[in-house]
Image (tube, rainbow, N blue to C red):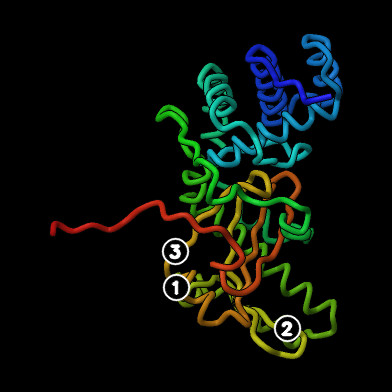
Amino acid sequence: MPTRHWTDEEVREAVASYIAMLDAYHTGDRLVKIEYIRALMARIDNRTRPAVEMKFRNISAVLAEAGLDYLDGYLPAFNYQRTKLPDRVFAELERRQDLLQMLKAEADRPVSVETFRSRDLIEEPPPVAKGLKAPSARQKRITPPHTIENLAAREARNGVLGRAGEESVCEHERRRLHDAGRKDLAKKVEHVALTRGDGLGYDVTSFELDGEERLIEVKTTRWAAMTPFFITPNELSVSQERAATYHLYRLYRFERDPKLFVLRGDLAKACRLEPIAYRARVA
């Protein structure tokens, strides 16, 4: 039997249900996802739970592409109908200005460096190891309305959050080396963005167990693993020139449940890079 297309009304119901769950997550309210799924399935006809969950994964993909947070239980699936779903998601977000304002406040909120320096970081495989891939270059790039701000870009300007992530990685590396019997190397881990300035193309100097340097660039977010991040031309260049020792540590869910994944080597090979600005001079 061919797959039955979702109607506009079904999509609106699914988006409203998803955004309500996202709101509950960020306000700290009780969130039992199966209750939302059952309520949604009661409002729409003949949709199975797997079908609903796949639609939720598509909604996660729209949010991730727009630089917004998404629900961890619904990993982004980018094979969605780009002519309809983004408009439905953005329309619901524009209706939920309270949620957008809450996310903006999260993006701007400082954190205590001392609080997070000692937090244990759980290392997970990179998203690609879980079968997650960014949208291909052939897929149409979505353009949110001007009323929907790219909050990943806003959060990236939160210097206090970035510094807390770097400090947390320093402690993570010291602990890793110490536990592996290299206390001598643990003492040499250096927060170079602090001691030598932020123009090196990486933030932390650590070590492999054989003493070889490990250069670490840290990117920190309070949000989900597939939230886009930003790299500078200098960071990209250093990752290519020193690919054998270069590591990007992506910290995510930093406040609630801090985790990280590691991308190694040339960032042009590890990431899909999109130009977002040009420096221009009058010709």
Looking at this view, is 37 or 207 the one in front?
A: 37
Q: Nearer the viewer, residue 235 or 218?
A: 235
Image coordinates of residue 174 in percent, x first then y, are 73, 75
Residue at 50% x, 71% y is 193
Q: Which residue is mark 3?
A: 232
Q: Which residue is mark 1?
A: 197
Mark 2, other Cα within 10 Å: few <14 / some 14–19 / many ≥20? some
Point out residue 271 in the picture as x, y percentages from the top left corner. 58, 61
- Measure the C-alpha gap from mark 3 to mark 1: 15 Å
Give how far across and how far down residue 97 sits, in percent: 52, 21
**Label 1 CA crowd tier, 10 Å (few <14, some 14–19, many 20+):** few
Residue 80 picture quarter: top right
- Occupied quadrant, residue 262: bottom right
Tag 2 secondary structure:
loop
Question: Reading the chain from its start, which is encountered first: label 1 or label 2?
Answer: 1
Any part of residue 120 in sight: no
Mark carried by residue 208:
2
